[in-house]
Amino acid sequence: MSDGQEMDVEALRSELDQIKDAMGIRERYEGATQIWLLFGVLVAVAAGISQYIVLDGLAGWLHWVNWAGVLGGGFTVWFLVTDTASEMSFSGEGKPHLGFQFMVVFLAVYPVSAVAEAYVPALSETAESAMMVSLILVMLGVAYAVMGASLRAYYVRRVDRYTFYVGTVLMVGLGTLVPHVEVLQTWAYAAFGGAYFVYAVAAWAFLSRT
């Protein structure tokens, strides 16, 4: 092996030590487990409001105002009042940027929905709303899987990463069921909010364990 190709033994040893010392999310990112509780509540509230919008036949654009206001406002308040929030770094040199990955995958729901709407007949407001919830759930589940896999680069222990994969199975499964279960087509937002709240509380309890 030439000099230019020689392995940096010390760097490799250091990296192996980090892998062996993989930590839980709670230890690596102080206060990060609170995010599950925060979004569990916020998603439940926003989903409840969206369910009311659907049942009352209100304008579809109110969903955008609702979710942006509840999730954006709630997260902003949490970030401002939580001392450790600004210290959490989910990006690093040579490592994937978790926030960017999540948003890219999740926001793919919009071009996907635009393509779907071009090939399906005109839908009722309830059916169109159910379709959007289905797509949102599936893409959200995929985004969770990507984040769970990427956290390996931050030496987060495998058992904690499984929390994201459980979320993937739950959300993709529910999103797939919505178009095929009549009651879910009407109550899609309520099902989303309830299922996510239960998942978020369970994830918080698991990740907060000692």
Image: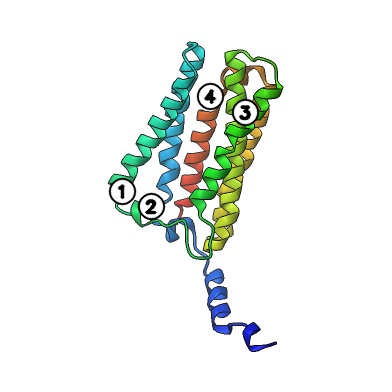
Asked whether the beta carbons under mark 3 and mark 1 sit within 8 Å of each other, the answer is no
Residue 189 image label: 4
Q: Is residue 111 above or below residue 17?
A: above
Secondary structure category for the residue under label 3: helix
Q: Residue at x 51, y 55 (%)?
A: 97
Looking at marks 4 and 1 on the same chain, the residue that comes earlier in the sequence is marked by 1
| Front residue of 62 and 49 | 62
Q: Residue at x 29, y 45 (%)?
A: 80
Front tag of 3 and 4: 3
Looking at marks 2 and 3 on the same chain, the residue that comes earlier in the sequence is marked by 2
Q: Name the residue type under label 4.
A: Tyr
Looking at marks 3 and 1 on the same chain, the residue that comes earlier in the sequence is marked by 1
Q: Is residue 52 above or below residue 2?
A: above
Asked whether the beta carbons under mark 4 and mark 1 sit within 8 Å of each other, the answer is no
Q: Residue at x 58, y 27 (%)?
A: 133
Q: Which residue is mark 3?
A: 114
Residue 82 image label: 1
